[in-house]
Image (cartoon, rainbow, N blue to C red):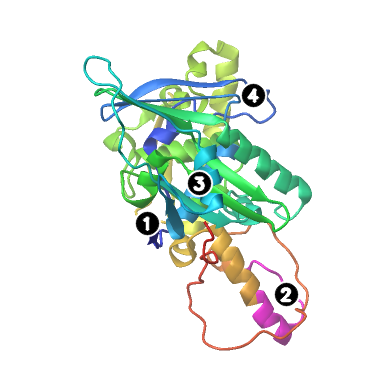
Amino acid sequence: MKRHIKPAYARFDPAHLLDGLFVPTRGKKRERLYVAPRDFDGVLIGYQGFEQLGADDQSVLLAIAAQLGIDGDFIGDNPPGPVAQELRSLMDFKIDFKDENGQDQEFDREELLASRQTTLRSLLIDAGYKEVDGGRALADMKNILNRLSNAQIRERSRNGWDRRCNLVSASFDDQTGKTYIAINPRLTKAVFHGQCVKISLFERNVLDGDVAKILHSWLSSNIRPGWALGRGNGARIDTLATHVWGPAWEAMPANQKSRKRCQFRDALDQIKCKTEQLHDGYGWAIDQTSSGMVQVSRPKRLPLVEIDYGTPACLDKAEMEDFERNSWDEGNSTVGQIGENYGYGPPHRRVGRKPASRPKRGKRDPRPNCESPPSQL
């Protein structure tokens, strides 16, 4: 069964934005990941892993969710293809179901995984990387996917159901360059038909630094488009800081908290100023007071470039097609003009050369088709 949805954002599960799951890690040694269980609609959800996840890991997971929303397959309990079987095996499912007396019961619920064939380069673009073609960037992406694959989500319900599995599973074919990705059942449900929050990749990718990116995701998950934080009442910086640095914020000494507050204020300024061009000058409205109160309002609509092109990788493909079409008439040209017209300066800017063969001309759909080739799962 194949679903074709055209979202202009990453559809994300709010439980995958728990405090402490993704924290600023740049320049720090990553400790072990542990997020204490929290109740979500009667289900206790917690996380653990070998390494703490950071903003770079969150960017990639959001990119995966966005790509799956555009063109994703489902993997059932008994997939026929070898790649699908490998992805399901790598998800490392552990499922228990006990009755009221604590006795094991049979579990017959089908666990669907969203999956698709993608490329490391498209994930780098959607995740906002400046360098997307070098060997170092590809190695970084593989490391991130391995970190996400080694992090586990655990869900326990009150009726005795207990499921543990990895956040994602990934399979690389170095000979063909193909990459296959699958995500856990809870995130799969959010991407296709469950409760979800909408996070703009274009807004996220114009931001610099871990704090701004993690804060933007949390604000996007807690403020509906056109609404304000706390129903217009705002919140204090020290309250919001726990959503960026997690439970570790409370144990920080006073001088360290003071430095973090400065970083937090800079992050708020970034979200306000750097997203304005994407919304024709009317982006996130943020007011800060000297007393530490913050008022935040979210734009009513997503950036126009996101509505027209879907994800940054789709925009990149459209810009390359535009370059190849126009370079025959104008000589050498710069890739990135379409994004600039929408107020989005692509993080990766390349100066192209005249293509080897003249492209065919004809009618072109104004919205590019960024779907992957037919899946071989």
For mark 4, give the secondary structure.
loop
User: Is the C-beta separation of discs 1 and 2 under 8 Å?
Assistant: no
Residue topped by disc 4: 30
Crowding at dot 2, Cα within 10 Å, few <14 / some 14-19 / many 20+, comes out as: some
Residue 175 percent across, percent down from the top left: 73, 56
SS for callout 2: loop
Decide: is 94 above or below 182: above
Q: Amino acid at mark 3?
A: Ala
- Looking at the picture, tell me which residue is in the foreground, 109 or 6: 109
Type of amino acid at the residue the image marks with label 2: Ser
Q: Is residue 286 magenta?
A: no
Residue 226 visible? The answer is: yes
User: Mark 1 or mark 3, which is nearer the start of the sequence?
Assistant: 3
Name the residue that disc number 1 marks: 301
Does label 1 or label 2 sit earlier along the sequence? 1
**Horizontal and vertical percent position of residue 78:** 42, 47
* Residue at image mark 2: 333
Q: Secondary structure at mark 1?
A: loop
Which is more foreground, mark 3 or mark 2?
3
Q: Earlier in the sequence, mark 4 or mark 2?
A: 4
Image position of 130 (left or right of 100)? right
Specify the quadrant of the image occupied by residue 318.
bottom right
Density class for disc 3 (Cα within 10 Å; few <14, some 14-19, many ≥20) is many
Q: Which residue is mark 3?
A: 182
Residue 274 visible in rendering: no
Residue drawn 47% across and 43% down?
Answer: 183
Going from the N terminus, do you reach mark 4 or mark 1 first? 4
Front residue of 186/126: it is: 186
Instruction: Determine the residue positioned at 47% across, 61% down.
Output: 310
Q: Earlier in the sequence, mark 3 or mark 2?
A: 3
